[in-house]
Image (tube, rainbow, N blue to C red):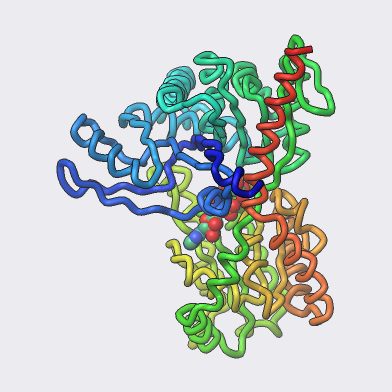
Amino acid sequence: EDGEREARPKQRLLVVANRLPVSAVRKGEETWQLEVSVGGLVSALLGVNDFEARWIGWAGVNVPDEVGQRALSRALAEKRCIPVFLDEEIVHQYYNGYCNNILWPLFHYLGLPQEDRLATTRSFQSQFDAYKKANQMFADVVSKHYEEGDVVWCHDYHLMFLPKYLKEHSVDIKVGWFLHTPFPSSEIHRTLPSRSELLRSVLAADLVGFHTYDYARHFVSACTRILGLEGTPEGVEDQGKLTRVAAFPIGIDADRFTRALELPQVQQHMRELMGRFAGRKLMLGVDRLDMIKGIPQKLLAFEKFLEENPRWHDKVILLQIAVPTRTDVPEYQKLTSEVHEIVGRINGRFGTLTAVPIHHLDRSLDFYALCALYAVTDVALVTSLRDGMNLVSYEFVACQAEKKGVLILSEFAGAAQSLGAGAILVNPWNITEVAASICYALEMPAEEREKRHKHNFTHVTTHTSQEWAETFVSELNDTIVEAQLRTKQ
Ligand code: ADQ
């Protein structure tokens, strides 16, 4: 039977996301240098053996000439990647505009942009048009490469029109859509001028997935309240057509982290870090510098903790690694200055001649450095104001088999649903509560730490990214079988 299984060609999975997991740098008219970035999605699908994955997305560069486009397509083909070419104007209006200035803040409960924000990025309508146009361009590329029997897995808020456009191309295309951010309460979603069109386009998919049950429920409520459709335990029904809606909590490739900790270079790095922070407890924050991550709130809570606990002065250090993103957006520039100002103030207040309480780095770390840091940390501090899941909390837990450190986790991160029993859950807006939790975490008895860690470690190592991808795709395949049975009846 095994032999038969080997002989059968694997099902092709077309993974469509705004960005390809590759960055491309042009080195000559026809030469491209490619670097694969192993994000969550890539590692999830690396471990999946049942399908043969192809990637479709934007390579992150503007390539106006056909010679360059052809050369890039050839180079990407070797990495099983297929590019969608977007010009600068589209990127500005679709990606910076509608995706990052409208959908991202709205889905994280930060509301719609105010007038002056809109004025700087043209009108809402033209951004929405560009969004649809970009989605159509993705759909064209997918349709061109689609073969019968393939399944198409669309990712995230950038591509909410893709299911609709793909089904318009052919109703037989099997389409799943997964959202990596929260889906907000229907009362938030209904403020969006294009609320109905977006919902209807997503509903064209066969399977719609979210990180948590709550997000799935919000989505179904939006469909019932805004579109007047019927919600069922399986999903949303519209004139006899069922769109299955369910929760598929993402995970990480935990083995990749535990294996890295065995490497000599990582162990060396850990020794260096332990030497540098000897005699002090180490607290860690690792975030993209984004308003949703609650970095200012985290710093203010740490300041309050220092204020209230002089015995901890000089005995604890907060290392905050914040990788800059979307640096051309004014809000993000403002956030950077705000964070720098708070760090400066706290270090001025509580620093000594030999040390400062906060080390803040505006940069990303490579994978091995990050693993070493996770492993030597005593307390990780994740204070997102909203976060679809938050993988940093998972990565920290995966690296803590030895140390059994404490995770302080925002109740507004999807991860609170899965790691809640092991972490100390906090409301990041409540600075007093977070400050008290820092103290509690630093002073927690070993026995309690071990118990909490065990719970989280078991979760992180069993609910992996591979399992997540396999579950989603197999459920998508099942959805299709069910639909076929229903039409035959
Ligand atoms: P993100 O908002 O990017 O993802 P997160 O889930 O924490 O948030 O993933 C960030 C990734 O980037 C992690 O793998 C982390 O290691 C890495 N990273 C962050 N800062 C870094 C730094 N300074 N240096 C190096 N690496 C860094 C979105 C949603 C999340 C959801 C994921 C996956 O916003 O809620 O969990 O997608 O669905």
Residue shown at 50% from the left, 78% from the top: 263
Q: Is residue 225 above or below residue 297?
A: above
Q: Position of residue 205 (x, y in %)?
A: 63, 24
Residue shown at 71% from the left, 31% from the top: 478
Q: Position of residue 367 (x, y in %)?
A: 48, 66
**Residue 176 occupies quadrant:** top right
As drawn, is 336 to the left or to the right of 437?
Answer: left
Residue shown at 15% from the left, 41% from the top: 29
Q: Name the one closer to the observer, 137 or 89.
A: 137
Q: Is residue 433 above or below residue 143?
A: below
Q: Position of residue 442 (x, y in %)?
A: 73, 77
Q: How many marks?
A: 0
Residue 193 shows in this picture: no
Q: Can you name the residue that lies furthest to the left here? A: 29
Residue shown at 70% from the left, 19% from the top: 484
Q: Name the one closer to the observer, 105 or 400.
A: 400
Q: Is residue 105 above or below residue 301?
A: above
Q: Name the one closer to the observer, 376 or 454.
A: 454
Give the position of the C terminus as an image quadrant: top right
Residue 172 shows in this picture: yes
**Residue 51 occupies quadrant:** top right
Q: Position of residue 18 (x, y in %)?
A: 46, 36
As drawn, is 168 to the left or to the right of 74?
Answer: right
Give ligand 1's quarter of the image.
bottom right
